[in-house]
Amino acid sequence: MTSSLRNLTVEDARARILAGASRLGVESAPLENSLGRVLAAPVIADRAQPPFDASAMDGWAIRRADYAPGAAFAIAGESAAGKAFPRAVQAGEAVRIFTGAPVPTGADLVVIQEEAVRDGETIRFEAGESPRANIRAAGGDFQAGDVLLAEGVVVDPWRLSLAASAGLAKVPVARRPRVAILATGDELVAPGASPRPDQIFESGSFSLAGLIGAWGGEAVRLKAQGDDAAAIAAAVTPVEADLIVTIGGASVGDHDLVKPALRTLGLALTVETVALRPGRPTWFGTLGDGRRVLGLPGNPASALVCAELFLRPLLAALTGADPEVRLSPARLLAPLAATGPREHWMRARLAVDAEGRLTAQAFPDQDSSLIGVFSQADALLRRRPGAPAAQAGEVVEVLPLRRG
């Protein structure tokens, strides 16, 4: 009889992985260290921006009621950014003003400098009958009390600028999940070492560490272990982590020892296998001390596909961000064969056609060991179980990959 933990759909497996996952904690981060962090509370303005009526142009500030083409004004002084004119503008006066400077009290018109002619201590304007005001109103960007950034958004450079413009030196952010990565297998050797003819370079932990950092986590690469249950358990036991990600040893062969090793630490599974290609051996569980464990297949493409489908949303949930995996429609550029009983996520390349529509073309070789194909892909193309052959021009679902 098939276990209820085996051959789960991608959606069911993801739901089980996300069950009980929520923001781990809150800390205050200096603004310069907040990039890429998830806000743990809304950012609210405590003053207007700009806090005063500001000139939008270099020119002359006057009272509109005094303006007439060719009228002469006495030059009363100037207003520059950070150095406001100290008093109200009187009738018949003009104040030299620069972009971003406070508009003096009483003035409600800035005539641009190209439309002014100076004659000693007087200035005349030829700006037509009804010139533009060229004034940015106080609070034109935001008002005191406005919610500038919502809880749960990721601080990017544009949002960082907004928080800075509100005068914040620190922002409340979610604590980064600490993720330990353990690659396993007798065949693995570290890059830079001298492999035997029957060994390969370990690459999975490097890519996953980069993804974890990009997805809001703090990655810790553990020393790779061979196919030794005791060594695997010993490597995991002292690690302080919110999540442990293992690579390899996830299937049911004689050398797949990760789950047996972690059962000695109280591993309880909630996902045993997923009806997924590539990535069927993916599993998830919790150790006796509460640490979560996500087991990824050893083949690099399988591990990276499953990282996109399961690890990324889990890290989002642990930082209080939105964990939903959003797909986009795209038109096929080349036909695809019918799928089998498992959901298939194919590495693909996106483009935009002459009509502005998103297109996708799956790579012809989808072997799960091919890292070179993944390095060229910028999307995963979803094919549902039992899908019939698809022809060029049909609409399919794609998950765009963040490639920098």
Image (tube, grey):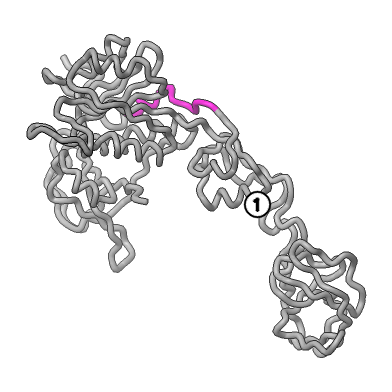
Q: Is residue 66 above or below residue 143?
A: below
Q: Where does residue 390 sit, x and y in percent of width and height?
A: 16, 50
Give coordinates of residue 393: x percent, y percent: 21, 58
Q: Is residue 17 magenta?
A: yes
Q: Quadrant of the N terminus?
A: top left
> What segment carries the magenta color?
13-25
Left or right placement of residue 267 versus residue 387 in this view = right
Specify the farthest residue to the right. Answer: 91
Residue drawn where x is 25% and y is 53% of the image: 395
Up the image or down, 59 lies above or below 300; here it is: below
Outermost residue, left side: 197
For the question of whether residue 34 can be seen, the reply is yes
**Which residue has dot 1 on it?**
165
Q: Is 22 covered by the magenta stretch?
A: yes
Closest to the observer, 223 or 119? 223
Q: Residue at x 47, y 26 (%)?
A: 22
Horizontal side of residue 264 vs 112, given as left or right: left
Quarter of the image where one finds residue 310: top left
Describe the element under mark 1 as helix, strand or loop: helix
**Type of the residue with mark 1:** Ser
- What is the x, y in percent for residue 60? 78, 77
85 lies above or below 223: below
Q: Quadrant of residue 289?
A: top left
